Image (spheres, rainbow, N blue to C red):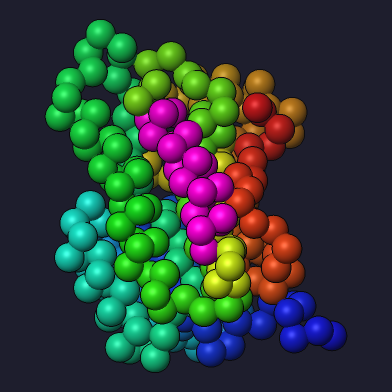
Amino acid sequence: MSKHEGRDLTGKTALITGASGGIGSETARRLAKLGANVVLHYNSNKQAAEELAADITAQGGTAIVAGGDVTDETACKAMVDEAVRAFGGLDILVNNAGISSAIPFGEMTADAIDKEFAVNVKSVILLTQAAAPHLEDGGRVINLSSNLAFAPLPGMTAYCAAKAAVSCLTRGFAKELGPKGISVNAVAPGATKTQMTAWIPDEMMQGIADSTPLGRVGEPDDVADVIVFLACGEARWVNGCSVMVDGGLV
């Protein structure tokens, strides 16, 4: 087996933003099971992050928590520095933190637009900038886009535009960091059962499920498994892609 193949992440360090629940926590669990040291970022839910770290540790993994505002440049650098200080380096960055909101076109305010783009877009730029100097050949950056980046939904166009920007950043950063041996990809989930989609009415979620060729909406592990693939050596020749993970809806 080539040293590039397989899914052994022993000795690697991964920083996962928004790791206190949903897709982030499932991703952290899977990366830890493959041997990675995981740094669990949280913004406000420290207890959930600490409980996840304790659970991962109890399962034989290695995890620490790191709080901070992903829209703040200093905080982003501090998170990366904490990962490097704790484990001696950084190999994988998962830009998972994000927000989702439904704002009708005529009700978009400047503050709401700023928040949407700050959390979903600016954070990706700031964290990737902070991480890049520490990532070496074989490093991975994995961003969370959305299938709505490719099929905008009325009433959510600001969110759709923000996620489209994430996919654009992914392609651009892949070209900028590729010469250093770092690959940058995105995962574009459809509706997934997480805290972030808890506001969606049950009838709307059922409508999405009915419209999806595979007949259901996503679960966090559906998305986490693809993130983990992109983090491993098996995905060494995948770069600049936004992988649709929505059961064929779009």
Residue 52: in sight, yes or no? no
Main SS type for the magenta part?
helix
Which of the two residues, 52 or 132, is positioned nearer the viewer here?
132
Residue 162 inside the magenta-drawn segment: yes
Residue lying at 30% horizontally and 88% vertically, measured from the top left: 85
Q: For residue 133, what is the image quadrant?
A: bottom left
Residue lying at 16% horizontally and 24% vertically, measured from the top left: 110
Residue 219 inside the magenta-drawn segment: no
Residue lying at 42% horizontally and 69% vertically, measured from the top left: 132
User: Is 43 located above or below residue 213 in the figure?
Assistant: below
Point out residue 116 in the picture as x, y percentages from the top left corner: 28, 35
User: Is 128 located above or below residue 162 in the figure?
Assistant: below
| Residue 115 in the figure: left or right of residue 143 | left
Question: Is the C terminus in the top left, top right, bottom left or bottom right quadrant?
Answer: top right
Question: Is the N terminus in the top left, top right, bottom left or bottom right quadrant?
Answer: bottom right
Residue placed furthest toward the right: 1
Residue lying at 42% horizontally and 85% vertically, measured from the top left: 89
Residue 230: in sight, yes or no? yes
Point out residue 123 in the picture as x, y percentages from the top left corner: 31, 52
Which of the two residues, 184 or 66, is positioned nearer the viewer here?
184
Which of the two residues, 144 or 4, is positioned nearer the viewer here?
4
| Residue 59 in the figure: left or right of residue 114 | right
Magenta stretch, residue numbers: 159-177
Q: For residue 198, what is the image quadrant?
A: top left
Point out residue 211 in the picture as x, y percentages from the top left corner: 66, 21
